[in-house]
């Protein structure tokens, strides 16, 4: 559920999500932008918590301490209907490109997990430093030590925000997000940024890799974030078909 990044959901809305989906349906909820340190529209914050400011967007430090705490508590409590229905998978925390590898940021990852407990969180990075050289092993070990699922990504390379396609399970849940390979990755237009249709040959290369990743975890979530037209749905169906064939090959005698 990507909309929760742009504005925190109302509990009534989450109740409708739970009611209108079949048994066994799982929602992964993207964390509200303010909670990951992204610039956040003032109008997206609960009306009674909005600071008096002429700014159109704010950061966590622009809120009084209690208002910030209230944003956290209201965001999490709004998910209660999904929790009670057994339909909440993870809360996905995608951190901004300036969230680099350093001690204070690692500490914030632990704070996030603590605030959300007993709900599950998954961690997605958008800065190259987390996987530069020896940092890759350090990052994965840190996540494993604290039982935090790492969000593996397929995305354009060559940018400071680029994270390599490292497939690793750091908890009993593995998560993979496909962002595409648009040559307009830096565009502010999300349709240009994510407007990429994977070819079947590209997805065929991924199928065995995903099957191997799934063997490292109890559960694996694979999400298509190439959200232009019906690209995500088409590629998801293709990938499901390829994975079905891959699994058949894995269990076929000989």
Image: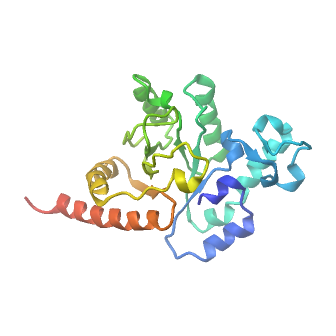
Q: x, y (%) of residue 67? A: 84, 44
Q: x, y (%) of residue 31? A: 64, 50
Nearest to the observer: residue 6 or residue 172: 6
With respect to residue 52, does 61 lie above or below? Answer: above
Q: Is residue 198 left or right of residue 2?
A: left
Q: x, y (%) of residue 202? A: 30, 53
Nearest to the observer: residue 243 or residue 184: 184
Q: Is residue 75 left or right of residue 217?
A: right
Q: Is residue 60 left or right of residue 237?
A: right
Q: What residue is drawn where x is 62% and y is 76%?
A: 19
Q: What residue is drawn where x is 41% and y is 59%?
A: 197
With respect to residue 120, does 3 lie above or below? Answer: below
Q: x, y (%) of residue 159? A: 49, 34
**The C terminus sits in image quarter:** bottom left
- Counting every numbered tag in the picture gives 0
With respect to residue 108, does 224 lie above or below? Answer: below
Model colouring: rainbow
**The N terminus sits in image quarter:** bottom right
Nearest to the observer: residue 228 or residue 21: 228
Q: What residue is drawn where x is 69% and y is 54%?
A: 6
Residue at the far right: name it: 52
């Amino acid at each position: 559920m990507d909309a929760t990044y742009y504005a925190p959901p109302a509990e009534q809305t989450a109740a409708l999500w739970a009611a209108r989906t079949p048994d066994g349906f799982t929602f992964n909820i993207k964390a509200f932008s303010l909670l990951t340190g992204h610039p956040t529209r003032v109008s997206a914050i609960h009306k009674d918590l909005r600071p008096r400011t002429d700014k159109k967007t704010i950061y966590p430090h622009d809120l009084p301490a209690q208002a910030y705490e209230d944003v956290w508590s209201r965001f999490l409590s709004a998910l209660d209907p999904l929790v009670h229905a057994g339909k909440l998978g993870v809360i996905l925390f995608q951190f901004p490109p300036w969230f680099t590898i350093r001690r204070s940021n690692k500490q914030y990852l632990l704070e996030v997990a603590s605030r959300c407990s007993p709900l599950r969180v998954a961690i997605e990075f958008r800065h190259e430093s987390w996987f530069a050289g020896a940092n890759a092993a350090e990052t994965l070990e840190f996540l494993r030590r604290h039982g935090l699922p790492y969000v593996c990504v397929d995305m354009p390379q060559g940018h400071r925000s680029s994270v390599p396609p490292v497939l690793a399970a750091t908890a009993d849940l593995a998560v993979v997000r496909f962002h595409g390979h648009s040559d307009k990755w830096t565009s502010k237009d999300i349709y240009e940024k994510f407007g990429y249709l994977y070819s079947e040959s590209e997805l065929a290369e991924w199928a065995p890799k995903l099957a191997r990743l799934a063997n490292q975890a109890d559960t694996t979530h694979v999400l298509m974030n190439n959200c232009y037209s019906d690209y995500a749905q088409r590629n998801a169906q293709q990938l499901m078909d390829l994975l079905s064939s891959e699994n058949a090959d894995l269990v076929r005698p000989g």
